[in-house]
Amino acid sequence: MNRTLLIARREYMAYARTVGFWLSLLAFPLFAVLGGAIPILMQTSEPVRRVVLIEQGPEAQGLSAAVRDALASDAKRRQDRAREAAATAAAAGAQTSAAGDALRSLSRPSMRLVAAPADMAAAPNGPAQEAVARRYLEDDETPRDQRISAVVFLTRIEGKPSARVWTGRATDDTVEDFVRAALKTYNRKETFARAGIDPTVVQQTEEFRADVSVFSPRAASGGEVSFKDKLPAIIGLIGGFLLWSLIITGASILLNSVMEEKSNKILEVLLSSASATEILAGKVLGVALLTLTVMGAWGGIGLFGLLTAAPAQGAQVLEILWGGGLLAWFVAFMVGGYLMYAVLFAAIGAFCETPRDAQTLMGPIMMILVVPMITMQMALTSPDSPVVRILSWIPPFTPFLMMARMPSHPPLYESLGALAAMFAFALFMVWVAGRAFRAGALSDVKLSWKAFGSAIRGGGR
């Protein structure tokens, strides 16, 4: 036992002393914050497009007004969404300046209509006018906030509204999509008007937005569903993804450690003073402590940030994790999942001396690990669907899918049964991987499925 703990300590300190480990540990929270902030920063930093509307010919009369009305309606919808989001954030306790900036960005328009320059408006319709538009769109000397982003020539083809959009960027289709939607709405109104339907009725129909409230007998209030009722499912899904990341990270560290020590003949030195079982147990324990360090750091940083930015929401998260029992399930699934994958990856590493050798067996394993990543998202909305329930009973998928399902309170027999099956499979993997690890560590056999299978069958002899 003492040798096992010494190997575990050595394995832990080999990584914990490196600067790269701590940089990697802090990188995940940093990228998580950037992942949420970058879309908001992109929206707020994106320049508002300055768009010119030109009606070509008397038959196009009224089309520019239709686009203006659509832009005004879009601005109103943005303001309504911003107000609703602000009210939701205030109710949840997220009253920070960052949250306020994010909510204000929802009401920011993507385009603004400007008057046509005099020479463009005076030019004859057709190629001459488009040549003037091209000159303005190619002008890079004008300040960015005064530059024309697009020129929209409105006309009719066979009596139907149409447009030709000249844009400064060939890859930017924002103006094109908006104009197409606006003309589609205008054409619908014209069609209804020709059919004798009152335009006021059409306008009221277009502007109608149903007031829909959601109720559930499982809501905390016993009636209307709030964000607090959705929070456990979100935490469960995040927990599933976090488990996947932690388990695979720990197992990969173990694989690389064993593979490196075998190639450098360090594993042979260790085998002269400790048994293969003690070495395997020590390495698994050492990397497990390393994984707990990562989990503690990520969890501490996340909770500190949440409690600082939104104390009310942070308190709700703590209540769900502790009072709802999710933290206990998280630990149980992490222990079983880590055991399954860690010993398997260690056994593979014992047969490998280079990363290329490991790819033979790692490819199929990583393909299997993609399955829970896809189905975990389904567990958020349909946790009791047959696919999710069946897959959650398959031990390699159990830690991730059951963690995502736990907030929906699956039957106790499913939770305990899947947990028992996972640990039974984990113990089986310990036995299998232990035999393979001993055989791989003591031989120079080239890695192959045949050699791996032979080691499992005869590793104990």
Image (cartoon, grey):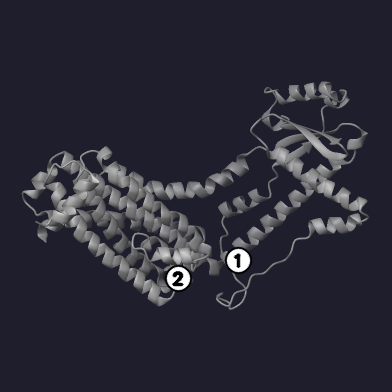
Q: Nearer the viewer, residue 363 or 207?
A: 363
Q: Which of 261 and 95 is in front in this view?
A: 261
Indicate whether 283 appears above or below 386: above
Mark 1 element type: helix
Residue at far left of view: 272
Mark 2 element type: helix
Q: What is the x, y in percent for residue 296? A: 34, 58
Res 301 quadrant in image: bottom left
Q: What is the x, y in percent for residue 61? A: 90, 38
Q: Nearer the viewer, residue 293 or 186?
A: 186
Disc marking residue 319: 2
Q: What is the x, y in percent for residue 112? A: 75, 39
Q: Residue at x 61, y 77 (%)?
A: 223
Q: Residue at x 40, y 56 (%)?
A: 242
Disc marking residue 2: none
What's the residue type where badge 2 is placed? Glu
Residue wearing tag 1: 91
Q: What is the x, y in percent for residue 401? A: 42, 62
| Residue 191 is at least partly visible in this image | yes
Indicate whether 358 appears above or below 394: above
Which of marks 1 and 2 precedes in the sequence?
1
